[in-house]
Amino acid sequence: MGALSHLRVLDLSRVLAGPWSGQILADLGADVIKVERPGSGDDTRAWGPPFLKDSRGENTSEAAYYLSANRNKRSVTIDFTQPEGQRLVRELAAKSDIVIENFKVGGLAAYGLDYQSLKAINPKLIYCSITGFGQTGPYAKRAGYDFMIQGLGGLMSLTGRPEGEEGAGPMKVGVALTDILTGLYSTVAILAALAHRDQAGVGQHIDMALLDVQVACLANQAMNYLTTGNPPRRLGNAHPNIVPYQDFPTADGNFILTVGNDGQFRKFAEVAGQPQWADDPRFATNKQRVAHRAELIPLIRQATVFKTTAEWVSELEKAGVPCGPINDLAQMFQDPQVLARGLAVNIPHPLAGNVPQVASPIRLSETPVEYRQAPPLLGEHTEAVLRDVLGLDAMAVHELRTAGVL
């Protein structure tokens, strides 16, 4: 039994931030019911190619994007623009512990599915709203997408090659990181609200905003600005506060060197055949290395090109200096540590036989994550959920289908 197997989640969200939170809760054992539009469902089902291939090698309607955030859930198709659909969702909410939604501010009130409406029928309900900008403020009514928030929220000003270099300019992160982080923070907030409910017996509304999360996750870079008043500049792969802590060229590519303290720098200098660097007053301490970054980095680059990436990694690991290669995803999934940790799993799928998944990073000794079910087909569990949770019989479900509610 999963740690959250006693909980039911009504997931009204789509795309990534909300579904990511729902998948975490599902991985931990919660019964997550994903409510989707009849006919099309979650937008990301169509965000391809690539699409999952069936047993004959033909594309299914399941995009890889959708498959990344929806395992261990049950899919129900309900048109809640219709009164009967609204009634069904309210009845499901009455029997749920958590609702996750990412509609525009006020968007669900017209259907009687906002927090105040559902709280009236289930005071213990924890209702998590995820939006681009939050429930308040001048931007509250705006739609918000990850790429936009990475720009507006300052992240892109820190990412990319610095001015003066070829290809200089702001760059987004290669995955929708703000969505992912919002999903993680939403899960933390939901678990906190559950702990409060255990003590006080009441639920609450959670207001999560992509912009808030993006700003919060600027971490040391935000503090670099707040303590100095100077906006940090782009440094490519370099670190604003630690030197050397970036990529360097090798005889056959590049590798990453992450020197975290002065002792590690001395060991690196010895492996590099330049022990005098560690005693040079310009480079002896991290503070001085940051101040003399422009002098030290070219010296290191001149030294690293004479060995291969594998040679540097091997020699520096023996010396206790953190470093590593720059893998593509094919190399990463074949890395011995990734293989040993089982970070790729397969789950049985009704069309493809099996669907690959990236494993959850959560390792619990008593209630481990279980991969119970592949990301569901659109409406795969409609009849089962309406029967098991709401007690509807086959005739009632048939009538709802005929009326276009399901």
Image (spheres, rainbow, N blue to C red):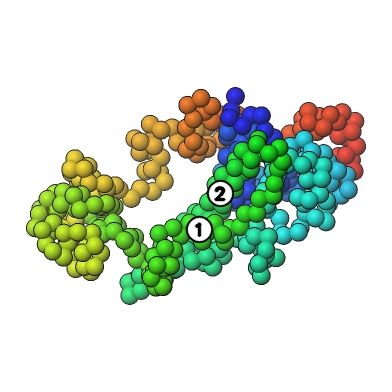
Residue at 61% across / 57% down in the picture?
A: 209
> Helix, strand, or loop for circle 2?
helix
**Are dots 2 and 1 in contact, CB under 8 Å?**
yes
Q: Is residue 255 left or right of residue 391?
A: left
Residue 71, given in percent of the width and then of the height, sits at 60, 37
As rendered, which of 238 and 333 lies closer to the eye? 238
Q: Is residue 301 visible?
A: no
Q: Residues within 10 Å of mark 1 (few under 14, many from 20)?
A: few
Q: Residues within 10 Å of mark 2 (few under 14, many from 20)?
A: some
As rendered, which of 147 and 32 lies closer to the eye? 32
Residue at 27% across / 51% down in the picture?
A: 260
Amino acid marked by disc 2: Tyr
Residue 79, given in percent of the width and then of the height, sits at 81, 47
Q: Is residue 397 left or right of residue 260?
A: right
Measure the alpha-carbon separation of dots 2 and 1: 10 Å
**Residue 3 versus residue 279 in the image, above or below:** above
In this figure, what is the number of numbered marks?
2
**Residue 44 versus residue 147 in the image, above or below:** above
Residue at 66% across / 29% down in the picture?
A: 6
As rendered, which of 21 and 349 lies closer to the eye? 21
Amino acid marked by disc 1: Ala
Between discs 2 and 1, the one toward the N terminus: 2
Residue 353, given in percent of the width and then of the height, sits at 59, 30
Q: Which labelled disc corresponds to residue 185?
A: 2
Residue at 23% across / 59% down in the picture?
A: 286
Say which residue label 1 marks: 216
